[in-house]
């Protein structure tokens, strides 16, 4: 039986692993379907303290993993299919196998939100993508007009990254003001290649018949006017939904699926803790996720100590 299982291997997960490992609890980290978490899909991370020149997202996560492993954390690349938190020890089904744990730290993060418009799903990987860093350099996007959807930091970051490859980047946002931080918004709007399309929504991705992206249909949300725009790629950056499906009915979630911490990082189930984007719809930063991972580890350690385990 494990003393601590950490579900998820992003900033929150690896920091929780680091702290529980240093407390001699030999945590098992279930890395899940996206080892390293969302940060591995980012290029340069400029706001993680301690890296004045910025650090590659993938490299930061690899370093976090190595640091935790140095103190005895173990990674397993299984995916958790089901959990039973009704009694302790808790039971987890990981790739068909049962694993038991005295405490669980949930750090499952969040996934890219989808627009839900016709063409989006059918053309995914055929021009529709949720990660400019992963796909932006593909030949199909080179010197072509591209569309980025969203108005947050992610959309600005994606648009700026794509200026290296696309001929022009249309930033389609549903309002007339970006949600992004000032510095990112200014950078995006001052780029000669980035052309904002305000108050507009993508209503369809074209063209399923050709089995590739050739453009989008747009609707101006103020005037109702509809138009079409040619492009070779649609990069969707409209936020994230928490990866908490497997916890439904086991712990308290809010209406959007975020885990609700009750006392510090402890959920409504004593012994189950939470950290990072799956419980945070406000800050959602690498550093706040890491901080929450640390807090969850300390809470788990104290919980076990209080039960002499
Ligand atoms: P976000 O801040 O939640 O922004 C999502 C954007 O998508 C918003 O502009 C929102 O519009 C729009 N949107 C949401 N649902 C939509 C829909 N169905 N159709 C069309 N547009 C939709 O998400 P994010 O940009 O991914 O950022 C998440 C967090 O990570 C933030 O805290 C951000 O600061 C952080 N982050 C930081 C950096 C950085 O500092 N370099 C980079 C990336 C992310 P409205 O504005 O109208 O709501």
Image (cartoon, rainbow, N blue to C red):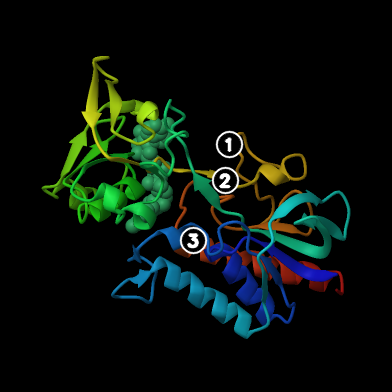
| Distance between the alpha carbons at the discs numbered 3 and 1 | 20 Å
Measure the C-alpha gap from mark 2 to mark 1.
8 Å
Residue bearing the label numbered 1: 256
Q: Position of residue 107 (x, y in %)?
A: 62, 58
From the viewer's perspective, is residue 10 above or below residue 53?
above
Mark 3 Cβ and ligand 1 under 8 Å apart: no
Q: Could you say which is closer to the camera, residue 235 or residue 231? A: 231
Question: Whole-Å distance between the Cαs marked 2 and 3?
Answer: 16 Å
Instruction: Give the quadrant of residue 208.
Output: top left
Residue in the foreground of this view, choosing between 95 and 190: 95
Image position, residue 100 (x, y; %): 84, 63
Name the residue beneath numbered marker 3.
288
Left or right, 243 with respect to 111, comes to right
Q: Is mark 1 within 8 Å of ligand 1?
A: no
Ligand 1 closer than 8 Å to the CB at disc 2? no
Disc 2 designates what residue? 242
Extreme top residue here? Answer: 224
Q: Quadrant of the N terminus?
A: bottom right
SS class of the residue under badge 3?
helix
Q: Earlier in the sequence, mark 3 or mark 1?
A: 1
CB atoms of marks 2 and 1 within 8 Å:
yes
Badge 3 density bin: few <14, some 14–19, many ≥20, Cα 10 Å: some
């Amino acid at each position: 039986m494990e003393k601590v299982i950490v579900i998820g291997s992003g900033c929150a997960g690896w920091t929780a692993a680091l702290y529980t490992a240093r407390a001699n609890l030999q945590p098992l980290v279930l890395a899940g379907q996206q080892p390293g978490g969302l940060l591995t899909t980012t290029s340069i991370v400029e706001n993680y303290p301690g890296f004045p020149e910025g650090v590659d997202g993938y490299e930061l996560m690899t370093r976090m993993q190595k640091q935790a492993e140095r103190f005895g954390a173990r990674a397993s690349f299984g995916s958790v299919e089901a959990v039973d938190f009704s009694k302790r020890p808790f039971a987890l089904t990981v790739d068909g196998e049962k694993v038991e744990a005295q405490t669980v730290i949930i750090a499952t993060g969040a996934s890219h939100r989808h627009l839900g418009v016709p063409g989006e799903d059918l053309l995914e990987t055929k021009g529709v993508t949720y990660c400019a860093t992963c796909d932006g350099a593909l030949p199909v996007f080179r010197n072509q007009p591209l569309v980025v959807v969203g108005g947050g930091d992610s959309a600005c970051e994606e648009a700026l990254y794509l200026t290296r490859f696309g001929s022009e980047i249309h930033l389609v946002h549903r309002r007339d003001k970006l949600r992004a931080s000032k510095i990112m918004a200014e950078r995006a709007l001052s780029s000669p290649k980035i052309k904002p399309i305000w108050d507009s929504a993508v209503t369809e991705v074209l063209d399923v018949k050709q089995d590739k992206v050739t453009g989008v249909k747009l609707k101006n949300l103020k005037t109702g006017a509809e138009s079409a725009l040619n492009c070779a790629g649609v990069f969707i950056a409209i936020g994230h939904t928490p990866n908490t499906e497997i916890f439904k009915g086991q712990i308290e979630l809010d209406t959007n699926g975020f885990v609700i911490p009750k006392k510090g990082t402890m959920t409504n189930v004593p012994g189950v803790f939470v950290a990072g984007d799956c419980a945070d719809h406000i800050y959602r930063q690498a550093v706040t996720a890491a901080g929450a991972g640390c807090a969850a580890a300390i809470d788990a350690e104290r919980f076990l100590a209080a039960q002499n385990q």
